[in-house]
C-alpha cells in the first residue's frame, strides 16, 4: 500500500506523519505546531501564559528536540513481550508512545506538571481571589463578551470582558461592601457576540451548578454561581475505603431509584438505597447521570455541563453527602464519566460555543469528524490543548472535590476509532485495532487521563466501556497500554440475550457459553455483567422479563405453587448471573433492580407516556414483601457476593474449566480453590456425578442455588462430606480425570449451580485425634 497522509489522525497542521504499509505503522516525519502554554498568576491577580506559541490554540504535538529523537523500541514496549503476536504492530505502539511522551513533556514544560495542568477549574470559570471574583472563559471565536446574571439585572454593559491573544476572556469583579458581588446560588451566563454581530447567551463551560426553572415546561438551564459559605459547605467525615481486591459493582441511577413515581434525591439515595447495596454485599457503587444533562431520558449520556452535578437530584453538597455516606459503609464510589461525546444542545451545552470556527478554536472537530451520527452529538478534538485541559481537569475535579474513587469511561470504543465502531463487527483481527482507523489523538488523551487519575489516586478503579477488545487497553501506560484497570466484558450480555431469545434450552451449548465467558485477554482484567442497563429500557427486556414475561405480574407469590415458567425463570436467572460472575471476569457488575429480577422496563417521562414517572422508578416493595419470590432472587444475589467476600475467587488468577459436558449440559470449573458445578439440563438429575479438582481432601457445599432460601427444592445435602480420590499419575495431566489430579462425586439436580469448598481441617484437632487414637489403641492392647 502506498504512503497515506493521515491528517485526520492529528487534526490540521500535519503534512506528513507516517506511512501505512501492509497494515503496519512506521513513523517517519513529524511536522507539528508548537504550543507552549502556561497558566500562572502574574503577580497582580491577573492571568498570563508563559512561553511562545502559534497564533492558533492547538495542541498538535511538537517535534521536541529532546523527545522526538528518543527511541522507544520494541524492548520497551511491554505489550509486545506479553503478547508476541503484537510484534508486527510495534511501530504503532512506538508511535503512540512517542505521541504520549511528547504531549506529557510539553505539559510538564509549560504547565509544570500534568497534575497542575488538570487544575484548570482553579483558573477557568468563576473563582474567588483576594477581594474579588475572577471569571475566565475560553472562546476565541467571540468578538465581544460580558458576564450577565441576577447580580447585574442581566445587563452586562458594566461587566465587559477582555480577551487575550489566546482567546481567553476574563473579568475581575470586585467585592461590594465586603461581600462577593455575585451572591452564592445566583444565576449567571456568558454573553458574547458572533462575527456576524449577533449576541448570544451561554452557560459558562466550567460552571459548577446549573438549574432549570421548575415552573416552566422545557425551560432552558441557567448557570449558577456556587460558592456556599463555610457553614453550608459539606465537610467530608470519612476516609476513602481501601481498594477492594475485586470490585463487586452496583450500577445505580439516583434519579430513578425512588419507589415513588418521581425523581429521587442524592440524600434519599444515601439514606435509603446505599444500606440496601451494602446489605447485598457489594463493595462498589457506580453512579450514572451525575454530570448535568438537560435531557433526562438520555440516561445521563448527553452531558451539557461537565463540572456541574445533575440538579434534578440536589446540590453539589448533597452529592458529597451521598459519597461520604457510601464511604462510611465501606463502599467505593465510581462515576460514569462521558468524555466520548457531548450533547448537541446549543443553549445550555458546550456546543453553544461552536459558532463555525476552526477546530483549533473549538472544543470539537469541524465537519463530519466533529459529529457523531449515531448519537446525534458532538465529538471532542482531543488534540486541542484547551480541550485536554478541560477534560483532564474535569477528571481531577470529581476526584478532588467530590472524593469519587474512580471512573467508568463511557463510549471508549467510539473514542478509539474514527469510525466510532459504527457498523463495525470486531473479529479480533489485530489489523482492526491498529490501522489508519485508530484515533491516536483519543488514545493519547486516554493514556494521559489514566496516568493522571492513578497519579492523584493510586488506588483508583478505572473501567473502559469498550466492545472492540483493543489489545492493551487494560495494561499500564508504561507498557504501551492505555492504562485502564478493567474493561467491561460487553459481549456477555449479548450472548445471554441471544440464547434466551433464539435457542431452546436443549440447544444451549456448554462450550459456546464457556468460551463467551472466558474469551478475554490474559493479564487484562474485565468486569463481567449478565445484562446491560440498556436492556431495561422500553423496547427491550431484562433477563427476568425475558424469562417470565407476564407471569412476573401474576406468578411471583410464594403462597401458590410456581408455574413451570416461573420455576424455570427463577432457576436460570440465578444460574446466568452467577456463572457470569464466577467465570466472566475479575470483577462483577449488576444494574439497580436486576439483583431481584425487577419487572417492567424503564420508560423515562416523555410525550408518548404523558410525561409519567411510573416506569422510571424501582419498586423496592416487591423485594421487601415476604411472600413474593423476588426476595428469593435477592437473597441469592446477596449470597453470591458474600461467597466472593469470604473466598476471594474473583481476585484469583486460577480459573480452570475442566469440563463442558454437552450431553449432560454440565459445566465444571475451578476459580481459586472453589469448585463450581452448573447443571443446565432442564430435567436430568445426576447422582454420583464426578467432578475434577486440584487439591485433595474433603469438600462441602459453600453455595447452592437449589437451597430453600433461594427458591429451590433443597435436594443437595449441605452436611455431606465429599472426599477426593487421586486420578492418574501425579503431574501427568493426560492421565488425570479431565486433566485434574483429583476428583469427587456430587449430586447435581437440573437447573442448579452448586459451589464446593475444601475444608481446611484444624491441625491441632488432627493431632489431638491422632493422640487420642494412639492412647485408645495402647489401652486396648
Image: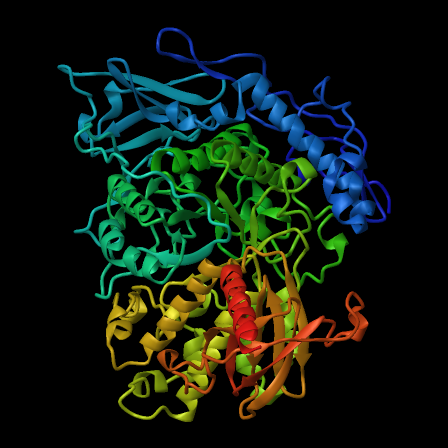
The answer to whether residue 597 shows anywhere in this view is no
Q: Residue at x 40, y 72 (%)?
A: 636
Q: Residue at x 33, y 57 (%)?
A: 278
Q: Position of residue 596 (x, y in %)?
A: 36, 72
Q: Nearer the viewer, residue 122 or 360?
A: 122
**In the rendered picture of this protein, how many numbered marks are placed on residues?**
0
The answer to whether residue 204 shows anywhere in this view is yes
Q: Is residue 378 above or below residue 138?
A: below
| In this picture, residue 777 sits left or right of residue 324 | right
Quarter location, residue 259: bottom left
Q: Residue at x 28, y 40 (%)?
A: 316
Q: How is the image coloured?
A: rainbow
| In this picture, residue 752 sits left or right of residue 133 | right
Which residue ends up furthest to the left in the rendered image?
A: 177
Q: Is residue 775 above or below residue 452?
A: below
Question: Which image quarter is the C terminus in?
Answer: bottom right
Q: Position of residue 734 (x, y in %)?
A: 81, 72
Q: Position of residue 413 (x, y in %)?
A: 59, 52
Q: Residue at x 30, y 46 (%)?
A: 328
Q: Position of residue 301 (x, y in %)?
A: 43, 52
Which residue ends up furthest to the top in the rendered image?
A: 43
| In this picture, residue 46 sits left or right of residue 54 | left
Q: Nearer the viewer, residue 762 or 725?
A: 762
Amino acid at each position: 500500500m502506498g504512503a497515506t497522509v493521515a491528517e485526520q489522525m492529528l487534526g490540521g497542521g500535519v503534512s506528513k506523519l507516517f506511512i501505512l504499509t501492509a497494515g503496519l505503522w512506521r513513523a517517519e516525519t513529524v511536522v507539528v505546531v508548537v504550543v507552549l502554554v502556561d497558566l500562572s498568576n502574574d503577580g497582580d491577580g491577573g492571568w498570563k501564559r508563559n512561553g511562545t506559541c502559534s497564533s492558533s490554540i492547538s495542541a498538535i504535538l511538537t517535534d521536541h528536540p529532546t523527545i522526538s529523537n528518543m527511541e522507544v523500541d520494541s524492548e520497551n514496549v511491554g505489550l509486545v513481550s506479553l503478547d508476541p503476536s503484537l510484534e508486527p504492530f510495534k511501530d504503532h505502539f512506538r508511535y503512540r508512545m512517542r505521541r504520549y511522551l511528547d504531549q506529557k513533556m510539553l505539559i510538564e514544560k509549560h504547565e509544570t506538571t500534568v497534575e497542575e495542568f488538570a487544575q484548570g477549574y482553579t483558573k477557568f470559570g468563576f473563582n474567588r481571589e483576594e477581594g474579588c471574583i475572577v471569571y475566565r472563559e475560553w472562546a476565541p471565536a467571540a468578538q465581544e463578551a460580558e458576564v450577565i446574571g441576577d447580580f447585574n439585572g442581566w445587563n452586562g454593559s458594566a461587566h465587559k470582558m477582555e480577551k487575550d491573544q489566546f482567546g481567553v476572556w476574563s473579568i475581575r469583579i470586585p467585592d461590594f461592601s465586603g461581600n462577593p458581588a455575585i451572591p452564592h446560588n445566583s444565576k449567571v451566563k456568558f454573553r458574547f457576540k458572533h462575527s456576524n454581530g449577533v449576541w448570544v447567551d451561554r452557560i459558562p463551560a466550567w460552571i459548577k451548578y446549573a438549574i432549570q426553572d421548575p415552573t416552566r415546561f422545557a425551560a432552558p438551564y441557567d448557570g449558577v454561581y456556587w460558592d456556599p459559605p463555610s457553614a453550608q459547605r459539606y465537610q467530608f467525615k470519612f476516609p476513602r475505603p481501601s481498594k477492594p481486591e475485586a470490585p463487586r459493582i452496583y450500577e445505580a441511577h439516583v434519579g430513578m431509584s425512588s419507589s415513588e413515581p418521581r425523581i429521587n434525591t442524592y440524600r434519599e439515595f444515601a439514606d435509603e438505597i446505599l444500606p440496601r447495596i451494602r446489605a447485598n454485599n457489594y463493595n462498589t457503587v457506580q453512579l450514572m447521570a451525575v454530570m448535568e444533562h438537560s435531557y433526562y431520558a438520555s440516561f445521563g449520556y448527553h452531558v451539557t455541563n461537565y463540572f456541574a452535578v445533575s440538579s434534578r437530584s440536589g446540590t453539589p453538597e448533597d452529592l458529597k453527602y451521598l459519597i461520604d455516606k457510601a464511604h462510611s459503609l465501606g463502599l467505593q464510589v465510581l462515576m460514569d464519566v462521558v468524555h466520548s461525546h457531548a450533547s448537541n444542545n446549543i443553549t445550555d451545552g458546550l456546543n453553544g460555543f461552536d459558532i463555525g470556527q476552526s477546530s483549533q478554536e473549538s472544543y470539537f472537530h469541524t465537519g463530519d469528524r466533529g459529529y457523531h451520527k449515531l448519537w446525534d452529538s458532538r465529538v471532542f478534538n482531543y488534540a486541542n490543548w484547551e480541550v485536554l485541559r478541560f477534560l483532564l481537569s474535569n477528571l481531577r475535579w470529581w476526584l478532588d472535590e467530590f472524593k469519587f474513587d474512580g471512573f467508568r469511561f463511557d463510549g471508549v470504543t467510539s473514542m478509539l476509532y474514527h469510525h466510532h465502531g459504527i457498523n463495525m463487527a470486531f473479529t479480533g483481527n489485530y489489523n482492526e485495532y491498529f490501522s489508519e482507523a485508530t484515533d491516536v489523538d483519543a488514545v493519547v488523551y486516554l493514556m494521559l487521563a489514566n496516568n493522571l487519575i492513578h497519579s492523584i489516586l493510586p488506588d483508583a478503579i478505572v473501567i473502559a466501556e469498550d466492545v472492540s477488545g483493543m489489545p492493551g487497553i487494560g495494561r499500564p501506560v508504561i507498557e504501551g497500554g492505555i492504562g485502564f484497570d478493567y474493561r467491561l466484558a460487553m459481549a456477555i450480555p449479548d450472548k445471554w440475550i441471544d440464547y434466551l431469545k433464539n435457542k431452546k434450552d436443549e440447544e444451549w451449548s456448554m462450550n459456546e457459553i464457556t468460551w463467551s465467558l472466558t474469551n478475554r485477554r490474559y493479564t487484562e482484567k474485565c468486569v463481567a455483567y449478565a445484562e446491560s442497563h440498556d436492556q431495561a429500557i422500553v423496547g427491550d427486556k431484562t433477563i427476568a422479563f425475558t424469562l417470565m414475561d407476564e407471569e412476573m405480574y401474576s406468578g411471583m407469590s410464594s403462597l401458590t405453587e410456581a408455574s413451570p415458567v416461573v420455576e424455570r425463570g427463577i432457576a436460570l436467572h440465578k444460574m446466568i448471573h452467577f456463572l457470569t460472575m464466577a467465570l466472566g471476569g475479575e470483577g462483577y457488575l449488576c444494574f439497580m433492580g436486576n439483583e431481584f429480577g425487577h419487572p417492567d422496563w424503564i420508560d423515562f417521562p416523555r410525550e408518548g407516556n404523558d410525561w409519567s414517572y411510573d416506569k422510571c422508578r424501582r419498586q423496592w416493595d416487591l423485594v421487601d414483601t415476604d411472600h413474593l419470590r423476588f426476595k428469593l432472587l435477592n437473597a441469592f444475589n446477596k449470597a453470591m457476593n458474600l461467597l466472593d467476600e469470604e473466598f476471594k475467587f474473583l481476585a484469583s488468577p486460577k480459573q480452570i474449566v475442566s469440563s463442558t459436558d454437552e450431553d449432560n449440559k454440565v459445566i465444571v470449573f475451578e476459580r481459586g480453590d472453589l469448585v463450581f458445578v452448573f447443571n443446565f439440563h432442564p430435567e436430568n438429575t445426576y447422582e454420583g456425578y464426578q467432578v475434577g479438582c486440584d487439591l485433595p481432601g474433603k469438600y462441602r457445599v459453600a453455595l447452592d442455588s437449589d437451597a430453600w432460601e433461594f427458591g429451590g427444592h433443597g435436594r443437595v445435602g449441605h452436611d455431606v462430606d465429599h472426599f477426593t480420590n487421586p486420578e492418574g499419575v501425579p503431574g501427568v495431566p493426560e492421565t488425570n480425570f479431565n486433566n485434574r489430579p483429583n476428583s469427587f462425586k456430587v449430586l447435581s439436580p437440573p437447573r442448579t449451580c452448586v459451589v464446593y469448598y475444601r475444608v481446611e481441617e484444624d491441625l491441632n484437632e488432627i493431632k489431638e485425634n491422632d493422640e487420642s487414637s494412639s492412647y485408645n489403641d495402647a489401652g486396648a492392647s
